Image (cartoon, grey):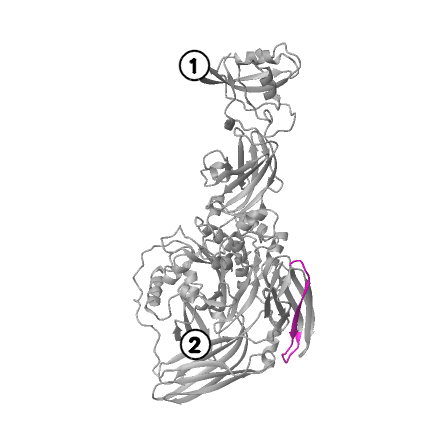
C-alpha cells in the first residue's frame, strides 16, 4: 500500500468546533453498504505512489462506526478508490486522526488531515464595531449616537465572532448597502471578500488577525463613496448575519487627501468641522457685534436629522458622493419653501404661531423639533438659516463657516445696481423698488474641490439657505466659487451673478419730487463702494471677528476691482440676464459696456463731504442725540441745501417708522464745516420698539446739494441701540459628571421698564436649552437665574444666554468653561 500523508496544513485550517457536533453529508454508496449504525465523516488524503512520488488528491466519504473494527477495512477501501475524485473537503471529526492513525497499516504514514470543525457550517455569532477606537481615529467620537460613525476613505476595524475557527476554505463576505434596494451595478452595494481582489467600487477589506473564533477585519471605504447610512450584513457560505445595530454612518472626510472636501490645515478642520459653537456677526457695517450661536452638530438626533434630509433631498445615490450636489440640496432643504424643509422664513414682524427668529440661540432645538414632527419649524431669518445650514454641513463632514456681508445688496432684476428712492427729507421710500440693501445678510461658505469647473475654483464656495430668489425653479443658492466672485466670473454655476451682486452692486440714489402733481424721479448720485462692506466670519481658533472681504473682492477702486466689475458686466445678456444657475458662455460680450477706467462717480467741485455721528450713547429710553456734519474742502463760497432724516428699520432695510427730519440751508466758505443737530425724543420711538418683534436699527440719511452746481451727495449710516449686559457666573473649570452652579445675572440700567422678559440659556454637553420667564423688570432691578449643571463631555464648553423683552430683543452673552476628568 502506498504511504498516506495529510494535505498541507496551511490549506486546511483547523478551528476549534463545538465538541461532538455531528456533520451529516451524503455518503459514497460503495463505502456505506451493509454497515452498522454510523456517522458520516469526510476524509481527505494525498496518495503518494511510485518512485516519482506523484501526488493526487482523492476524496472519500467514510461512514464509520468509531467503535467497531471495521474501520481498518474502510480505510483500505477508501485508499483504493480511483483518483483524483475532488478537492479535499477540509472537514472532519475531532478524534478522527487518532482513530485512523491507530487502525491504518504499519506501512502507511497518516498525519492529521481534518480540522476539528470539519462538517460544521461557519456562522457569525456577533459583531463588535469597536466604536470607541474607530470614532476616536475618525474624529467622530463627539456624536451622541450609539451606532458607528466613520469618515470615507479611512480605515476602520470590525471584529467578528464565529461559531468556530475561520478556515482558509470558508467563504466570508461583508456587504455594505445604502438605499432601499442596494445593487452592485449601481454602486450602492459593496460586497467585500478579504480573500479576493479589492472591490471595483474603491472599497478595501483585509484580515488584520484571527485567533480562535474571532477575526479582526480592516475596512476602508472609497474616498468618493456616497455619504449616508449604510447597512451591514455578513455572509458565510449560505448563512447571513444581520446585526441589530448594523447601521454604519459614512461621512465626508476633510482629513483624507482623496476626499474632495480635504482641508489640509488642522486648525481650520478643528474650527470648520469640529467646533460646535461660534459667532454670527450682525448689526451694521460700522457697528458690528456678534451673536453667540450653538451649532451643536454632535448633539442627540442631529446626525439622524441630516440623514433624513439626505433621503428627503431625493438626490440620486450617485450624487451623494459629490459635496457640490449635497450642499446645493441642503441649501434648499434648510428652508421650507418648496419641500417642507426645516425652517420657514418670516420677515413680517408677526410670529404669534411660532418662535421669533430673535429667540433662537442655536440650531439644536430647531433640528430636533423638525426630526420629531417632520414639519417645518416656525420661524427663521437669514442668520438662523445660516446657523442651521452650518450645523448640517459640519455634521455631514463638509467644512463650513457663517459669512456676514454688511450692506448686502438684494438685486432682484440682476443688473448689478440697487435703486434707492428718497423723498425731499431724505426718508427712504421702500415701496418704489423691489431692490433692497440689507444692513447685513448671512450665508455660508463650504470648502470643496470643484471638479465640475475649470481649474482654479477649488476652495470656499458660497451657499445660501435663505429663500430670496429661485434657482432652477426652487429656493436654493450655490455652491458658487468665491474665487469666481472675486474675479467677476459670474457665468460659473451656481448662482454666481446673484452672489456677485450681493457684494458688488452699485447704489443709485433717486430723489422723488412732486412736479405738477406727479412724482418725478431725479438721480442724485451713484455710490460704487457702499455694498459688500466688512465681510466677516469667526476667526480660526479665536473668539474674534475675521474680515474676509479680500477673499470676495479686490480693494475698492483698484485696477483689479475695476477689471472684475467689467468682466462681470460683460456677461450680462444684451436682452437681460442669463438665468441664475445656468452655465452661460465663457466668452465675454463686449458690446454696449464701457471699458474700465477711472471711477465714473462725479468728483465734487467743492470737496463736499457728509458725516453722521451720535453725541450720546444710543440707549433705549434716552433721546437720540444725532448730528450731521457738512464739510467743504476747496476755495469758494458754497450754499448748501441739507436734508436729513432718522428712521427705524429692520435689518433687511424695511422702514418701521420715520422718527424725524431736518432741512436747512448752510453757507460754507472754503475749507470749513458745520454741524446740524438731529434730536429724537424717546417717546417718538419707544412705541415702535414695543410694537415690533424684530430688533430694529437706527438709520440716518443726509442729502446735500450745492446751489448753482450739480454737486449732490448722499450719505447713509445705520447704528444699533446699546444695551446693558448679561453676566454669567460659574467656575473656570468643572469635573466630568460632577455638579456645579451657573448663574445668569442682569441689571436693568435703562430708564424704561422691560416687559415680558425671557432668559434663554443653553450649554452644549452640559444642559439643554432652558427658558426662564422673568416678567417685567423695572429700571434698576436685578434678576438672577441659576442652573445646576452636570457636564457629560470633556473639553471647553460654552454657556450661551439671551434676554428678550417687549422693548429689547438682542442682549446676548456667552462664557467658556473647561470640563476635566
Front in this rendered view, residue 235 or 570: 235
Q: Is residue 673 left or right of residue 759?
A: left
SS category of the residue bearing label 1: loop
Whole-percent x, y for residue 249 in the image:
55, 46
- Give percent across and percent down for residue 79: 53, 14
How many C-alpha atoms fall within 10 Å of the one at disc 2: few (<14), some, or many (≥20)?
Answer: many
**Foreground residue among 13 and 744:** 13
Q: In this view, does 599 lie to the left or right of 794?
A: left
Q: How many marks?
A: 2
* Residue position marked by numbered label 1 in the rendering: 51
Q: In this view, does 173 lie above or below 613?
A: above
Q: Name the residue under label 2.
A: 511
Residue 777 placed where, x, y %? 68, 75
- Depicted 142 relative to depicted 700: above or below: above
Q: Is residue 306 magenta?
A: no
Badge 2 element: strand
**Which residue occupies the extreme top position in the image?**
34
Q: Which of marks 1 and 2 is nearer the N terminus?
A: 1
Specify the quadrant of the image occupied by residue 93: top right
Range of magenta residues:
736-754
In the image, is residue 297 above or below residue 703?
A: above
Q: Is residue 243 above or below residue 674?
A: above
Q: Which of 696 and 737 is in front in this view?
A: 737
Mark 1, Cα crowd under 10 Å, few <14 / some 14-19 / many 20+, is few
Residue at mark 1 to residue at mark 2: CA–CA distance? 115 Å
The x and y percentages for residue 552 are: 41, 64
In the image, farthest residue toward the front = 106
Amino acid at each position: 500500500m502506498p504511504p498516506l500523508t495529510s494535505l498541507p496544513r496551511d490549506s486546511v485550517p483547523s478551528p476549534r468546533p463545538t465538541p461532538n457536533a455531528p456533520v451529516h453529508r451524503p455518503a459514497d454508496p460503495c463505502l456505506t453498504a451493509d454497515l452498522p449504525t454510523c456517522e458520516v465523516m469526510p476524509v481527505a488524503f494525498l496518495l503518494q505512489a511510485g518512485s516519482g512520488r506523484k501526488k493526487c488528491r482523492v476524496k472519500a466519504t467514510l461512514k464509520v462506526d468509531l467503535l467497531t473494527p471495521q474501520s481498518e477495512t474502510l480505510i483500505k477501501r477508501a485508499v483504493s478508490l480511483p483518483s483524483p475524485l475532488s478537492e479535499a473537503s477540509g472537514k472532519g471529526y475531532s478524534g478522527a486522526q487518532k482513530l485512523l492513525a491507530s487502525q491504518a497499516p504499519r506501512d502507511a504514514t497518516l498525519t492529521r488531515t481534518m480540522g476539528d470543525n470539519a462538517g460544521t457550517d461557519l456562522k457569525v455569532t456577533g459583531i463588535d464595531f469597536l466604536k470607541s477606537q474607530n470614532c476616536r481615529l475618525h474624529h467622530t467620537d463627539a456624536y451622541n449616537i450609539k451606532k458607528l460613525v466613520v469618515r470615507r476613505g479611512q480605515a476602520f476595524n470590525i471584529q467578528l465572532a464565529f461559531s468556530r475557527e475561520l478556515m482558509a476554505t470558508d467563504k466570508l463576505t461583508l456587504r455594505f448597502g445604502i438605499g432601499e434596494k442596494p445593487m452592485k451595478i449601481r454602486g450602492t452595494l459593496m460586497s467585500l471578500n478579504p480573500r479576493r481582489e479589492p472591490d471595483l467600487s474603491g472599497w478595501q477589506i483585509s484580515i488584520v488577525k484571527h485567533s480562535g473564533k474571532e477575526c479582526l477585519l480592516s475596512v476602508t471605504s472609497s474616498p468618493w463613496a456616497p455619504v449616508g447610512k449604510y447597512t451591514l450584513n455578513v455572509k458565510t457560505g449560505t448563512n447571513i448575519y444581520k446585526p441589530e445595530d448594523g447601521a454604519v454612518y459614512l461621512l465626508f472626510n476633510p482629513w483624507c487627501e482623496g476626499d474632495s472636501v480635504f482641508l489640509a490645515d488642522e486648525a481650520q478642520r478643528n474650527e470648520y468641522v469640529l467646533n460646535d459653537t461660534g459667532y454670527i456677526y450682525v448689526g451694521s457695517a460700522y457697528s458690528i457685534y456678534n451673536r453667540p450661536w450653538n451649532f451643536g452638530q454632535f448633539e442627540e438626533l442631529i446626525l439622524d436629522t441630516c440623514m433624513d434630509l439626505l433621503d428627503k433631498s431625493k438626490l440620486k445615490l450617485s450624487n451623494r458622493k459629490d459635496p457640490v450636489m449635497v450642499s446645493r440640496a441642503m441649501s434648499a432643504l434648510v428652508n421650507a419653501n418648496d419641500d417642507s424643509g426645516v425652517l420657514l422664513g418670516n420677515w413680517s414682524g408677526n410670529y404669534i404661531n411660532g418662535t421669533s427668529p430673535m429667540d433662537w440661540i442655536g440650531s439644536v432645538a430647531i433640528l430636533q423639533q423638525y426630526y420629531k414632527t417632520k414639519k417645518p419649524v416656525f420661524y427663521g431669518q437669514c442668520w438662523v438659516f445660516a446657523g442651521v445650514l452650518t450645523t448640517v454641513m459640519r455634521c455631514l463632514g463638509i467644512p463650513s463657516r457663517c459669512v456676514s456681508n454688511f450692506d448686502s445688496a438684494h438685486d432682484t432684476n440682476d443688473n448689478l445696481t440697487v435703486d434707492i428712492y428718497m423723498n425731499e427729507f431724505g426718508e427712504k421710500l421702500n415701496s418704489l423698488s423691489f431692490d433692497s440693501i440689507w444692513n447685513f445678510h448671512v450665508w455660508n461658505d463650504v470648502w470643496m474641490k470643484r471638479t465640475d469647473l475649470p481649474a482654479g475654483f477649488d476652495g470656499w464656495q458660497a451657499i445660501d439657505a435663505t429663500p430670496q430668489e429661485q434657482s432652477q425653479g426652487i429656493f436654493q443658492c450655490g455652491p458658487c466659487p468665491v474665487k469666481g466672485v472675486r474675479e467677476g466670473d459670474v457665468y460659473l454655476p451656481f448662482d454666481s451673478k446673484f452672489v456677485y451682486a450681493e457684494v458688488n452692486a452699485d447704489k443709485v440714489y433717486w430723489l422723488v419730487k412732486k412736479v405738477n402733481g406727479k412724482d418725478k424721479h431725479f438721480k442724485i448720485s451713484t455710490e460704487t463702494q457702499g455694498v459688500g462692506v466688512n465681510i466677516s466670519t469667526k476667526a480660526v481658533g479665536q473668539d474674534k471677528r475675521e474680515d474676509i472681504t479680500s477673499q470676495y473682492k479686490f480693494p475698492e477702486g483698484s485696477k483689479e476691482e475695476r477689471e472684475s466689475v467689467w468682466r462681470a458686466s460683460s456677461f450680462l445678456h444684451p436682452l437681460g440676464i442669463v438665468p441664475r444657475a445656468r452655465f452661460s458662455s465663457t466668452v465675454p460680450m463686449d458690446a454696449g459696456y464701457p471699458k474700465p477706467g477711472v471711477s465714473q462717480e462725479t468728483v465734487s467741485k467743492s470737496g463736499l463731504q457728509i458725516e453722521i455721528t451720535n453725541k450720546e450713547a444710543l440707549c433705549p429710553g434716552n433721546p437720540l442725540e444725532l448730528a450731521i456734519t457738512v464739510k467743504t474742502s476747496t476755495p469758494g463760497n458754497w450754499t448748501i441745501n441739507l436734508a436729513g432724516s432718522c428712521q427705524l428699520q429692520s435689518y433687511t432695510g424695511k422702514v418701521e417708522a420715520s422718527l424725524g427730519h431736518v432741512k436747512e440751508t448752510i453757507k460754507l466758505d472754503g475749507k470749513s464745516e458745520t454741524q446740524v443737530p438731529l434730536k429724537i425724543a424717546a417717546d417718538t420711538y419707544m412705541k415702535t420698539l414695543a410694537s415690533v418683534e424684530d430688533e430694529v436699527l437706527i438709520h440716518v440719511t443726509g442729502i446735500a446739494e450745492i446751489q448753482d452746481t450739480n454737486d449732490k451727495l448722499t450719505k447713509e449710516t445705520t447704528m444699533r441701540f446699546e444695551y446693558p449686559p448679561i453676566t454669567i457666573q460659574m467656575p473656570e473649570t468643572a469635573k466630568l459628571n460632577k455638579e456645579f452652579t451657573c448663574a445668569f445675572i442682569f441689571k436693568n440700567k435703562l430708564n424704561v421698564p422691560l416687559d415680558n422678559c425671557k432668559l434663554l440659556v443653553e450649554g452644549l454637553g452640559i444642559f439643554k436649552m432652558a427658558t426662564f420667564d422673568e416678567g417685567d423688570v423695572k429700571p434698576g432691578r436685578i434678576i438672577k437665574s441659576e442652573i445646576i449643571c452636570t457636564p457629560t463631555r470633556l473639553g471647553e464648553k460654552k454657556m450661551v444666554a439671551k434676554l428678550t423683552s417687549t422693548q429689547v430683543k438682542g442682549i446676548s452673552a456667552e462664557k467658556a468653561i473647561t470640563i476635566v476628568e
